[in-house]
Image: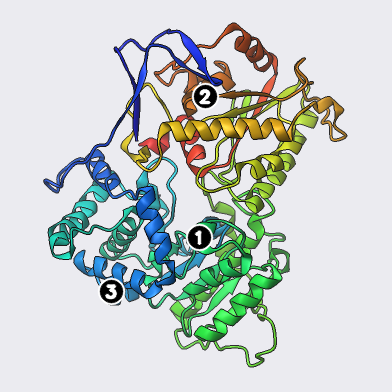
Amino acid sequence: MMVFFSGGKRLGAFCVTRFRGLYCPTGFSIKYYSTKIAPQLPEMEYQDAICTLNTLQTNASALKQIWQERGLPQFQLQTMKVYLERAGLNVEELDHLNMIHVTGTKGKGSTCAFTEQILRSYGFRTGFYSSPHLVQVRERIRINGQPIGKELFTKYFWQIYTRLDETKDAHGGAMPPYFRFLTILAFHVFLQEKVDLAVIEVGIGGAYDCTNVIRKPWVCGISSLGIDHTQILGDTIDQIAWQKGGIFKQGVPAFTVKQPEEAMTVLKDRAKEIKCPLRTCPELEDYQTACGPLHLGLAGQHQRSNASLALHLSHTWLQKRFRPDENFCLSDDENAGIPQATGFKPSPTMVKGLANTNWPGRTQKLRHGAITYFLDGAHTMRSMQACVDWFRETAVPDERNAREPIARVLLFNATGERDSAALLKLLVPCHFDFAVFCPNITEVVTLCNADEKNFNISLKSMLTRCFDNERSWHLHNPMGDRADSEELIHGSLPMVPERKTNTLVFPCILSALQWITQGRDSLVTNSGNRVFQVKASVETKAAFLRDAAELHVLVTGSLHLVGGVLKHLDPSLSK
């Protein structure tokens, strides 16, 4: 989606009105433009490639049709195989990528990041396919930990797109949807770049996910399971576990972290049915090292199970690399639970890999002068609770030791089918002074970067969701007086006179950040666009933020929101 204000080029000071609580410029209308560019020459620029890629985004009606096909896994995988063949690839070629396949509800991306970093630390040339991206789509396809360059992306994009476009007439005009196309592109890139291994993160589920076209991964992993994507995967933990267990392959070793009992039962049955040797990873504390406790590059207690899973995935990959005759046998006792994986002593390289892992947007802390940003794309109940625990563990020591008061601000958005009210309820104990809501649009006064366009939802729907979130926050937080809480943190600011958390809705991420930071973060203030002015009553509230010695800003609810914030806070991600 491209969103911008029309009506002249003057973007300096202008009046702002409130529409159902939203602050936006008067005299400006919002228009939408869908850019569809047919393939022309391989030398076309990166942005042209991205605009063409975006024409493959799937609208709501098509998504519904895909969901209805979920009972036909062979049909979906066969369709993916046809797309591969049209693109000049085949499943037999994928067997040579030495892949590690990882699924889960929470933590699968972090697990992949740990695994990739460990194996890259050994000197292997790694490929890494993940989703979603935060700032640029190239982040989804990485070589040696880095997003592929724009030139490389453009070259390989047109190679695949042109082949598919030239063969579409013989297949009823069909082109692969956005995620399937990127999956094919990732396989093509990894084959062309001759990586030693590829770490592949499942998109949604497992059994019906297009990444499950993989026939012979070297090892599979399942991170923590929970309730998410219920329209696709089912609304019970056993249904979801069945879907996730769909990535198991006969004779291919697989590992899981500890799961709820009903999920464990389903995973055990799936592994037995497929004849896959499945093991449970131990607690991170159970690993013996010469250097004491293991240190992780990613913060939060919930990362410890992800790190344990990554250790066994990388350890098993290395065993198969250097001891290909290793026998990974099934459990002889059919009545036993899933056996625990055999312990081992992590090598110094593994220890270093865990410590050096970086995965932006997940329990990430950025300090810009007097403002500390806490960024976590949590969007499920379990991941949000983990985010709350991490935020309180990290922010509380700073606030206790502060000589001057510190104000807390929540910046939140949630998308799709997720229960925003339930997620917000988990955030109430953090006692925010302000709760700010905005859609996942970085700016409204300029043309959005092509990487950020979303054709599947209107701005009106986005804003409606923000206002619903604001109402939910007040329902869960009718008083919000931090001074009345038994968990009052020494040094934190008292509430403003209204005795409830102040809330505001803004039309885009930049406008929200500019109001929250009040000129105290030059990256936001000097972004080139001053996109709002507010009424005097709102400026009074802003004085509360300006008077605080420091600000703690938690950004959560959506990885796309976190990505939009990072676009402004870390310009290097846009290069």
Residue 34 lies in quadrant = top left
Q: Position of residue 386 (x, y in %)?
A: 68, 49
Front disc: 3 or 2: 2
Assign a secondary structure to mark 2: loop
Which residue lies under the disc numbered 3? 93
Assign a secondary structure to mark 1: helix
Residue placed at 55% from the left, 81% from the top? Answer: 271
**Placement of 149 over or under 337, stated as above or below:** above
Q: Do the numbered discs 3 and 2 sit on residues whose CB atoms are within 8 Å?
A: no
Q: Is residue 126 left or right of residue 493?
A: left
Assign a secondary structure to mark 3: helix
**Can you say which quadrant of the picture contains the N terminus?**
top left
**Placement of 479 over or under 102, stated as above or below:** above
Q: Is residue 401 left or right of residue 120?
A: right
How crowded is the residue under tag 2: few (<14 C-alpha within 10 Å), some, or many (20+)? many
**Pick the front one: 198 or 59:** 59
How crowded is the residue under tag 3: few (<14 C-alpha within 10 Å), some, or many (20+)? few
Distance (Cα) linking label 3 and label 2: 49 Å
**Placement of 268 over or under 288, stated as above or below:** below
Sequence-wise first label, 2 or 1: 1
Q: Is residue 567 visible?
A: no
**Placement of 207 over or under 369, stated as above or below:** below
What amino acid type is highlighted by mark number 1? Cys
Residue placed at 75% from the left, 17% from the top? Answer: 498
Distance (Cα) linking label 3 and label 1: 22 Å
What amino acid type is highlighted by mark number 3? Glu
**Pick the front one: 104 or 288:** 104
Q: Which mark is residue 112?
A: 1
